[in-house]
Image: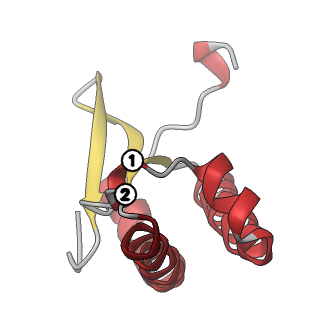
Amino acid sequence: MPMSDKKFFSPAEVNTLIPRLEMILERMQRVHVRIRQEMELLAVNSDQCAHDITIAQLLGLKPELRPFFVELSQSVDDIEALGGSFKGLNLGLVDFPGKIEGEIVELCWQYGEKEI
């Protein structure tokens, strides 16, 4: 998207999106916990470290988990549709492009915060 077409958010605009972002991140956290449980189970049963199991390996062994990965992907799409940029589940970060006093900035929101 050309820079001139890019939407810039005010902190107040992002703050109005926080309830929706919280719902999306809560859903992602629940799915992530389920996936981690399955990875830990596989690791215990195969004497591997859970961190060494790739998504492809996990899906090869447990194809019934595919909908969980689809849900995670859809959640990222939902965040992007709101105008945000998902930065990671571990910290629950979402950035929104903004302008403050004419300067382009990233308005950062972290899961659990009630406002920017």
SS type, badge 1:
helix
For label 2, count other residues whose C-alpha is less than 10 Å away and answer few (under 14), some (14-19) or many (20+): some
Q: Residue 105's x, y, as percent?
A: 28, 30
Mark 2 is on which residue type?
Answer: Gln
Tell which of 74 and 68 is nearer to you. 68
Residue 97, labelled with which disc? none
Marks 1 and 2 sit apart, C-alpha to C-alpha, by 7 Å
Determine the residue positioned at 67% across, 24% down: 5
Tell which of 24 and 18 is nearer to you. 24
Q: Which residue is mark 2?
A: 48
Tell which of 70 and 45 is nearer to you. 45
For label 1, count other residues whose C-alpha is less than 10 Å away and answer few (under 14), some (14-19) or many (20+): few
Q: Nearer the viewer, mark 1 or mark 2?
A: 2
Q: Which residue is mark 1?
A: 52
In what quadrant of the picture does the C terminus appear?
A: bottom left
In what quadrant of the picture does the N terminus appear?
A: top right
On the image, which quarter does residue 78 sit in? Answer: bottom right
Is 40 on the left or on the right of 69, as rendered? left
CB under 8 Å between discs 1 and 2 = yes
Determine the residue positioned at 29% across, 46% down: 107
Determine the residue positioned at 23% across, 79% down: 112
Mark 1 is on which residue type?
Answer: Asp
Q: Is residue 79 visible?
A: yes
Q: Residue 41's x, y, as percent?
A: 44, 80
Q: Residue 19's x, y, as percent?
A: 44, 84
Is 92 on the left or on the right of 23, as rendered? left
On the image, which quarter does residue 93 sit in? Answer: bottom left
SS type, badge 2:
loop
